[in-house]
Image (cartoon, helix red, strand yellow):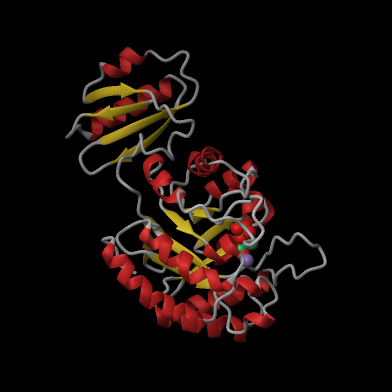
Amino acid sequence: MIVIMQPGASQTQVDHVVQLVKDFGLREHVIVGTDRTVVAAIGDKRNVDKGAIENAAGVDRVVPILAPYKVASREVKRESSVIPLGSGASLGGRKVAMIAGPCSVESREQLMEVAEAVKEAGAVGLRGGAFKPRTNPYEFQGLGEKGLELLAEARERTGLAVVTEVMSIDQVDLVSRYADVLQIGTRNMHNFNLLSACGGTDKTVMPKRGWSATLDEFLLAAEYVINAGNSNVILCERGIRTHETYVRNTLPLAIIPAIKRESHLPIVIDPSQGTGHAYMVPAMCRAAVAAGADGLLIEVHGDPEHAMTDGAQSITPETFAKTMRELGAIASAVGREC
Ligand code: PEP
Ligand code: MN
């Protein structure tokens, strides 16, 4: 349930409500909005005296949260969240955040070339996998810590925020030492222990939607992170599995308005995993920005034909720069900027 405080309720009144919530064995999550504060009370409500909370000074009303997810829900926080991306950039505000870079970090030369090019074209974040979740165990698994070091070096050079995947709980500390944003891959969206472990860090966390997860399951994955104490969560749609074969995954852009209705969290679209084909990526970038995406996660490679992973869906730095120019016009048509 959520306790909606009256506009202008004092800090002492909010603190008192928090104490009451705790006394009833619930966990509190305080959201300070522009006009009022809301205290979300999470947990088993069977022994809660709702009237006692309702009568506390400064309380306007107590209402149940109907959605299965609570702190990720827009019922709890009406204003859209602006989440820090790192290096001074953020995601969820007026500016649509572009996160671009290779699928995998392959070498210093490859990474620095792409990082400088995407920065020049207007990206604010650098993507690149150091630990790669590969279906085939004999394929390139990523450079590991060496890849993380290169990402940190690229951040140093360009000022781009680093977004990279963490595949398991035992990697969380290591990846957190280098990354600004911890990406949780589609295959791990149901790894609840990993979600909670990332929720225990002070890094922004970006779960990608499981390729067969429903919207509710996706938001419940975000709920795990927030529930573990970390509200800095970005959602990423990367396409789902359908019967269709002309795409690697089917990219459901309708999730953008759906997420905007259901949650206050920002949504990023990954048109690279979302289509599997470089030629489709610019069109899906344009469509995503037009539909209200808060950011894009795009695979860019200096030599896609020789990329160690996902070359077929990687665009070149030149195509990225051209796409950025087109996105500027679309963003301003929908009240945003790139
Ligand atoms: C990636 O971003 O390269 C990746 C492996 O993503 P996903 O988990 O969406 O497949
Ligand atoms: Mn990839």
User: Up-down: is 237 above or below 262?
Assistant: below
Tell whether 133 sits left or right of 254.
right
Whether residue 165 is visible: no
State which quadrant residue 221 falls in. top right
Location of residue 271 in the rendering, given as x and y in whole percent from the top left corner: 52, 63
Indicate the position of residue 127 as horizontal and vertical percent values.
54, 69
Question: Residue 4 in the image: x percent, y percent?
Answer: 28, 29
Residue 124 can be seen in this image:
yes
The residue most toward the right is: 138
- Dividing the picture into quadrants, the one containing residue 152 is bottom right
Please tell me which residue lies in front, 306 or 31.
Answer: 306
> Split into 4 quadrants, where in the image is the C terminus?
bottom left
- Classify residue 221 as left or right of residue 190: left
**Nearest the camera: 69 or 2?**
69
- Residue 62 found in image quarter: top left
Seen at 41% across and 48% down, the residue is 265
Q: Where is the N terminus found, in terms of image quarters?
A: top left
Q: How many marks?
A: 0
The correct choice, above or below, for 282 with respect to 63 in the image is: below
**Residue that lies at the very extreme toward the left in this rendered image:** 8
Identify the residue at horizontal 24%, vertical 35% (top origin).
11
Tell me the quadrant of ligand 1.
bottom right
* Front residue (pair 260, 86): 260
* Residue 277 versus residue 30 in the image, above or below: below
Q: Would residue 203 be found to the left or right of residue 81 on screen?
A: right
Residue 213's spot in the image, x, y percent?
60, 43
Give above or below for 334 relative to 68.
below
User: Which residue is drawn at the image coordinates 79% and 62% (left, top)?
Assistant: 136
